[in-house]
Image (tube, grey):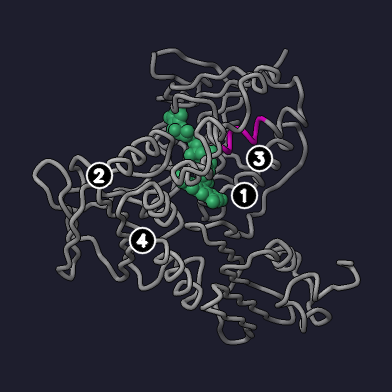
């Protein structure tokens, strides 16, 4: 008889795990997925395209209903899991129902942070995480509401771009002195800023949100240095917090995320966590690729194999506000490192490759990211680059002409 395996969360991590698991352990588990969003799992990354009007909301579903049915998966969506009874191996869901499990997988993702400033609870303050948020933001844009987006990371830039494209006047405010400071060095961030500003988005850096003004609704944002921006709505896109409450209340060890070992196992027997809610070797990843790598490992482990997860080399490879951006590895210059840089601000291209001990250790690309995956491979494989060094900056086809031909 199949063992009951329950996944909490019907997001990207859950969908990929079902995919991997049904390939390597077909029939071994009777899988149930409990998700609180009222729709089939979808590609959250593409919410930015939906907001920008480039993709329809119904086109971002990861798998159609019959895909889940064909794999025998019981899907409960629009349904919150409220409690784990570790001893009895039962999961309670909001309508008081309990589901028994032999294995439980937490894939509960994250929640956007709301800044703790006066006015943060006014009507007109929103976040950007799920398809309900996107519907709301599109309504704001259609009414030409003046929007302030708080946060100059990937999410904030995507929110600003989508809103501006949909017709809203947008100001993006960022606490730090440059955009995407964790992924980009200063020249790359400067170039990105000017390319985004060309799309009509007003960007304020070194901008610390002090309060949101308004009686009952948002009327403006005041910065710590006294600047004030008139606004009808504020979107917080200044970080995320892993959803750990379910694990914590069950007595499972949590830190920032749910703590897991190299088998993605939590401190409780047969309870695993992965994706954005998990913390592995002190790291909570906020990207899809690590969640997918974890899915492969966990599926093999659940199938009885000896797979281990050793962490991910994180790369950012995306279109940010319509501009291609890539960064990976250790890309800051420093002692013992050499940097090869190509910078064409007018043409909208910046490339920086960082080399240490004869190997590529990091890369930042803005504008032209055609060779991003090749650079990522070189970083991950730690290949010596002496042979290709002269042409490496100009891409794979020039560095390895014979092979490329
Ligand atoms: C707009 C946007 C753009 C992004 N762009 C990129 C990108 O370009 N590249 C990239 O790598 N990453 C990107 N990300 C991040 C990426 O989407 C996440 O890393 C990924 O979705 C994480 O998958 P997950 O399954 O762990 O979490 P999620 O996809 O968040 O899924 C978790 C699910 O669990 C549900 N849940 C939580 N608690 C419960 C409960 N108690 N009961 C039932 N259900 C519950 C949640 O509602 C959610 O549906 C983006 C994110 C957003 C919001």
Above or below, 89 against 138 in this view is: above
Q: Tell us which disc is closer to us: 4 or 2.
A: 4
Q: Tell us which disc is closer to us: 3 or 2.
A: 2
For marks 4 and 1, the one nearer the N-term is 4
Residue 214 placement (x, y as % from top left): 12, 48
Marks 3 and 2, how far apart at CA: 35 Å
Quadrant location of residue 136?
top left
Q: Which mark is residue 289?
A: 1
Label 3 element class? helix
The residue carrying pointer 2 sits among few (fewer than 14), some (14 to 19) or many (20 or more) residues within 10 Å by Cα, namely many
Residue segment shown in magenta: 12-18
Label 4 element class? loop
Q: Tell us which disc is closer to us: 3 or 4.
A: 4
- Nearest to the observer: residue 211 or residue 146: 146
Tell me if label 4 and label 2 are in contact, CB under 8 Å. no
* Residue at left offset 19%, top offset 57%: 221
The residue carrying pointer 1 sits among few (fewer than 14), some (14 to 19) or many (20 or more) residues within 10 Å by Cα, namely some
């Amino acid at each position: 008889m199949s063992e009951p395996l329950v996944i909490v969360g019907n997001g990207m991590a859950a969908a990929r795990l079902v995919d991997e698991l049904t390939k390597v352990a077909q029939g071994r588990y009777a899988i149930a997925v409990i998700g609180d969003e009222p729709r089939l799992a979808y590609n959250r990354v593409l919410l930015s395209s939906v907001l920008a009007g480039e993709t329809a909301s119904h086109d971002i579903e990861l798998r159609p209903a019959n895909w889940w049915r064909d794999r025998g998966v019981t899907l409960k969506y629009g349904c919150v899991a409220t409690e784990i009874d570790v001893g009895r191996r039962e999961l309670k869901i909001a309508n008081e129902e309990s589901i028994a499990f032999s294995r439980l997988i937490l894939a509960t993702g994250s929640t956007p942070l709301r800044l703790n400033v006066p006015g943060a609870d006014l009507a007109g303050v929103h976040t950007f995480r799920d398809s309900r948020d996107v519907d709301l933001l599109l309504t704001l844009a259609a009414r030409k509401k003046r929007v302030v987006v708080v946060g100059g990371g990937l999410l904030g830039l995507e929110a600003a771009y989508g809103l501006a494209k949909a017709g809203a006047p947008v100001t993006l405010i960022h606490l730090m002195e440059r955009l995407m400071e964790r992924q980009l060095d200063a020249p790359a961030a400067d170039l990105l800023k000017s390319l985004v500003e060309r799309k009509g988005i007003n960007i304020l850096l070194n901008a610390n949100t002090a309060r949101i003004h308004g009686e009952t609704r948002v009327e403006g944002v005041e910065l710590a240095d006294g600047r004030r921006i008139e606004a009808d709505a504020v979107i917080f896109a200044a970080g995320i917090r892993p959803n750990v409450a379910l694990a914590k209340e069950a007595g499972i060890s949590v830190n920032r995320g749910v703590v897991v070992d190299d088998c993605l196992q939590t401190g409780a027997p047969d309870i695993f966590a992965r994706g954005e809610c998990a913390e592995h070797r002190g790291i909570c990843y906020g990207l899809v690729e690590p969640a997918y790598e974890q899915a492969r490992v966990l599926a093999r482990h659940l199938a009885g194999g000896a797979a281990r997860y050793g962490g991910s080399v994180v790369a950012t490879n995306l279109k940010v506000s319509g501009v291609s951006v890539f960064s990976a590895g250790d890309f800051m210059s420093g002692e013992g490192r050499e940097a090869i840089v190509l910078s064409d601000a007018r043409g909208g291209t910046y490339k920086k490759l960082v080399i240490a001990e004869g190997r590529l250790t990091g890369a930042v690309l803005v504008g032209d990211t055609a060779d991003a995956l090749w650079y990522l491979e070189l970083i991950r494989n730690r290949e010596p680059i002496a042979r290709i060094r002269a042409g490496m900056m100009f891409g794979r086809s020039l560095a390895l002409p014979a092979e490329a031909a």
